[in-house]
């Protein structure tokens, strides 16, 4: 039986996101918890590009009607993607992260939570978090930016919300996973914000609670007050989620805070700057910083430029308004732009890992 899970694990690792093997083989037990053997066998034959059940069944060597039935079940279990095209339903494989793991929010139990934790600990950020470009990108708190500073659409969480036509919220899978193993925090659980370009997308969903645009904007504000970090996919176009992360539970931020992978998440393109004359040395920003990028030196807050990710969490509670975000620039005065979209991200990631894209999408 391990053969089907080994084949699926290798298929998932051939995706630019990665799914590295471990010495203990816990990744196989993890997949066995999520996929029945026949589901794993079918998923191992799938591609990131959308295909009909007939095309997938021909490659897998099973009856087309049985394949279609099985694929629909796999969609309901959050194992694969589906969309409706001119020729009917089309199905596609998902990466493990971001993808399969996040879609297990309704099925997450203590056993799955323990397997996930063991996998994360054994991998320790290897491939998943250590490969460029990073999976996630930090988005700054809106009110943290210097007055008059130009902000691009993908750098503004509120703008991303405003541009959508449907909004939903679900439990944070990472916070839920950590709570189930007795290591959770006190932050709000329901903070994972989803967005779509068509109205009504989340109506009737089991995992996602449909909300209004106004509720979504209030959620962003609440998360900022709690000191949570906004993160999105590390590309410029077509964002469909905003994670609101804590460094104690988030599988990505833990790469920075726990596993020692500084580039586990891409910085926002901004940097915290302290006005020494205004700073009272109260230490509020030091306590708020998720990445320990601030310290007090002679009763004045100072920024560790290497650790600052430009999240802006430090700014809203500064009683003297002495800290703000400014544009980060390299030695030539330029600001690095993230990949254009998810396909550009995939291409760059595949190049970094020296894996071919041929056969993954089609």
Image (cartoon, rainbow, N blue to C red):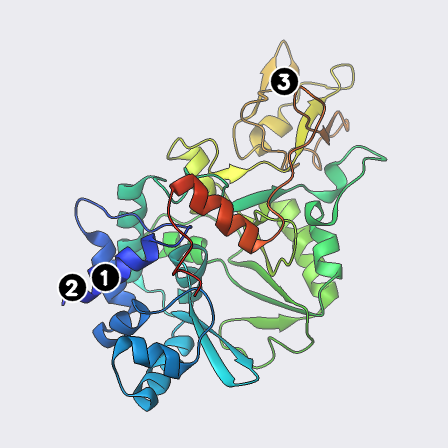
Residue farthest to the left, as pictured: 1
Q: Nearer the viewer, residue 332 or 254?
A: 332
Which is nearer the N-term, disc 1 or disc 3? 1
40 up-or-down from 318: above or below? below
Quarter holding the C terminus is bottom left
Q: Is residue 249 left or right of residue 170?
A: left
Residue farthest to the right, as pictured: 148
Q: Is residue 44 visible?
A: yes
Q: Is residue 135 visible?
A: no
Q: Which mark is residue 302?
A: 3
Q: Quadrant of residue 138?
A: top right
171 up-or-down from 63: above or below? above
Quarter holding the N terminus is bottom left
Q: Which mark's residue is nearer the viewer, 1 or 3?
A: 1
Q: Which mark is residue 7?
A: 1
Q: Secondary structure at mark 2?
A: helix
Q: Position of residue 348 (x, y in %)?
A: 50, 44
Which is nearer the N-term, disc 3 or disc 2? 2
Q: Nearer the viewer, residue 74 or 302?
A: 74
Q: Nearer the viewer, residue 181 or 207?
A: 207
Residue drawn at 66 percent across, 28 percent down: 271
Badge 2 density bin: few <14, some 14–19, many ≥20, Cα 10 Å: few
Q: Is residue 23 left or right of residue 180?
A: left
Q: Mark 2 and 1 residues: CB-CB less than 8 Å, in contact?
A: yes
Q: Which mark is residue 3?
A: 2
Q: Which mark's residue is nearer the viewer, 3 or 2?
A: 2
Q: Position of residue 20 (x, y in %)?
A: 29, 47
CA separation, marks 2 and 1? Answer: 6 Å
């Amino acid at each position: 039986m391990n053969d089907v899970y080994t084949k699926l694990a290798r298929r998932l690792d051939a995706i630019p996101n990665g799914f590295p093997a471990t010495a203990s083989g816990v990744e196989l037990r993890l997949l066995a918890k999520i996929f029945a053997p026949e589901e794993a066998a079918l998923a191992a034959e799938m591609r990131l590009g959308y295909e009909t059940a007939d095309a997938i069944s021909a490659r897998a060597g099973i009856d087309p009607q049985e394949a279609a039935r099985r694929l629909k079940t796999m969609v309901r279990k959050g194992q694969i993607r589906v969309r409706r095209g001119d020729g009917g339903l089309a199905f596609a494989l998902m990466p493990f992260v971001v993808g399969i793991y996040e879609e297990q929010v309704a099925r997450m139990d203590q056993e799955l939570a323990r397997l996930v934790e063991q996998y994360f600990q054994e991998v320790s950020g290897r491939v998943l978090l250590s490969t460029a470009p990073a999976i996630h990108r930090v988005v700054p708190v809106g009110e943290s930016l210097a007055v008059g500073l130009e902000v691009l659409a993908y750098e503004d969480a509120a703008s991303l919300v405003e541009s959508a036509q449907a909004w939903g919220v679900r439990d944070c899978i990472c916070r839920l996973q950590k709570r189930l193993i007795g290591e959770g925090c006190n932050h709000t659980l329901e903070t994972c914000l989803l967005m779509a370009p068509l109205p009504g997308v989340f109506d009737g969903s089991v995992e996602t609670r449909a909300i209004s645009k106004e509720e979504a904007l209030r959620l962003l504000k609440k998360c900022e007050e709690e000191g949570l970090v906004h993160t999105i996919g590390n590309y410029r176009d077509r964002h469909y989620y905003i994670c609101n992360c804590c460094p104690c539970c988030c599988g990505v931020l833990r790469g920075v805070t726990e596993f020692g992978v500084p580039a586990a998440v891409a910085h926002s393109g901004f940097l915290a700057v302290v006005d020494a004359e205004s700073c009272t040395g109260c230490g509020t920003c030091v306590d708020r910083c998720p990445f320990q990028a601030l310290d007090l030196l002679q009763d004045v807050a100072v920024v560790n430029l290497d650790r600052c990710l430009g999240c802006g969490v430090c700014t809203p509670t500064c009683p003297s308004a002495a800290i703000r975000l400014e544009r980060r620039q390299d030695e030539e005065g330029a600001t690095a732009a993230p990949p254009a979209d998810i396909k550009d991200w995939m291409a760059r990631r595949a190049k970094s890992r020296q894996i071919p894209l041929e056969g993954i999408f089609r």
